[in-house]
Image: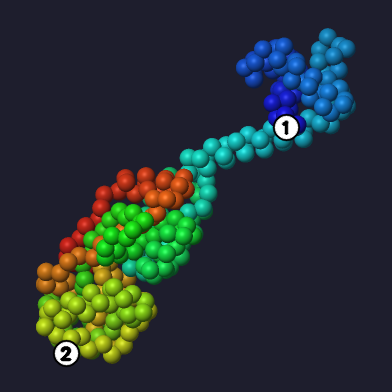
């Protein structure tokens, strides 16, 4: 059934006047008459009583008209959905993220995206950097948030922030009274650290900074996530080194202090595969381009 013919029938049924219906559809009257006649031939029943001076619906036409209106509305909705999908305003966006992105980058990114594309379904998944890279390459992920350490073939990135390393200390620790501390001040302390299995690059860089400061960190406890690390520090299990921004915590239990050492900042980047032609991803990248890079070289909030 040709939706143009159905739309023509609905217009005539609404107006009960060929001239007004033709004007409404921006077609000439002969074309409109042919479309209605074609629909009647397809259905095998007359839809209008033309024996009177004024058009009137036949019983078949009166029965058909409500369903026809619904069909026209659904067709218009489908057209609108297709066009919105082409513009990236409908669909699904799959985003992976490392945990440190949850404190600033992820909420900022998604809030900005949802302002312009509120009807896109966003699916977020906590994933390691390695898992995100594999998922971006095989197409099971549209975008990732992680900390790149070198260029990755087949993956494009845009830096969202550059973040410092900070010390996490129990609130009662002697160093907690200082505004800043040197990394070497932590020599001899017991450390709570990210497990190497959950993030080998982060683990290796932190240990490398300690070695460069003249000591080997004495790691007595490791953990898979930063909240657990902070909880263990608050409990007095040890000190830690974390990438800012840090999670909200009770300052009566744990404090975060900037380091005086001249250490490189840690990039947090949005990553995607250029081979991914998703219109929704394209809208996300357009959204990100609106926001300036968030650079911080010291301090914690």
- Is there a contact, CB below 8 Å, between mark 1 and mark 2? no
- The way the protein has been coloured in the rendering is rainbow
**Neighbourhood count class around disc 2 (C-alpha, 10 Å): few under 14, some 14–19, many 20 upward:** few
Chain-order first, disc 1 or disc 2: 1
Dot 1 falls on a residue whose secondary structure is helix
* Identity of the residue drawn at 69% across and 32% down: 72
Q: Work out whether 13 lies above or below 249.
A: above
Give the labeled residue for mark 1. Answer: 69
Give whichever of 180, 138 is nearer the camera.
Answer: 138
* Image spot of residue 189 (x, y percent): 19, 88
Give whichever of 250, 199 is nearer the camera.
Answer: 199
* Identity of the residue drawn at 70% across and 12% down: 29
**Neighbourhood count class around disc 1 (C-alpha, 10 Å): few under 14, some 14–19, many 20 upward:** some
* Image spot of residue 51 (x, y percent): 88, 12
Residue 113 — which label? Answer: none
Number of on-image labels: 2
Q: In this orientation, does residue 147 appear? A: yes
Quadrant in the picture for residue 106: bottom left
Give the labeled residue for mark 2. Answer: 188
* Identity of the residue drawn at 52% across and 46% down: 90
* Image spot of residue 260 (x, y percent): 11, 72
Given this view, does label 1 or label 2 mark the residue nearer the observer? Answer: 2
Asked whether, in this view, residue 197 is left or right of residue 183, the answer is right
Asked whether, in this view, residue 92 is left or right of residue 28, the answer is left
Quadrant in the picture for residue 155: bottom left
* Identity of the residue drawn at 15% across and 73% down: 259
Q: In this orientation, does residue 255 appear? A: no
In which quadrant is the N terminus drawn? Answer: top right
Asked whether, in this view, residue 207 is left or right of residue 285, the answer is left
């Amino acid at each position: 059934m040709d939706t143009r013919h159905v739309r023509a029938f609905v217009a005539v049924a609404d107006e009960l006047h060929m001239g007004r219906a033709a004007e409404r559809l921006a077609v000439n009257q002969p074309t409109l008459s042919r479309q209605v006649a074609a629909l009647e031939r397809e259905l095998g029943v007359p839809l209008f009583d033309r024996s009177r001076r004024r058009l009137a619906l036949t019983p078949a036409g009166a029965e058909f008209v409500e369903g026809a209106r619904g069909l026209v509305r659904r067709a218009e909705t489908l057209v609108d959905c297709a066009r919105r999908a082409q513009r990236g305003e409908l669909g699904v966006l799959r985003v992976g993220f490392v945990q440190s992105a949850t404190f600033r980058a992820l909420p900022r990114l998604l809030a900005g995206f949802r302002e312009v594309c509120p009807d896109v379904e966003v699916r977020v998944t906590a994933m390691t950097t390695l898992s995100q890279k594999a998922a971006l390459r095989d197409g099971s992920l549209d975008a990732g948030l992680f900390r790149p350490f070198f260029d990755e073939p087949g993956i494009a990135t845009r830096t969202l922030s550059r973040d410092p390393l900070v010390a996490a200390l129990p609130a009662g620790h002697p160093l907690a009274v200082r505004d800043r501390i040197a990394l070497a001040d932590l020599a001899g302390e017991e450390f709570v650290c990210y497990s190497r299995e959950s993030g080998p690059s982060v683990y290796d860089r932190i240990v490398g900074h300690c070695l460069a400061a003249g000591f080997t960190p004495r790691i007595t406890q490791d953990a898979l996530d930063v909240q657990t690390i902070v909880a263990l520090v608050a409990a007095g299990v040890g000190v830690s080194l974390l990438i800012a921004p840090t999670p909200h915590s009770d300052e009566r239990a744990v404090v975060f202090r900037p380091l005086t050492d001249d250490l490189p900042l840690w990039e947090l980047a949005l990553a995607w595969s250029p081979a991914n032609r998703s219109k929704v991803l394209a809208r996300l990248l357009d959204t990100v381009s609106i926001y300036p890079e968030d650079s911080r070289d010291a301090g914690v909030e």
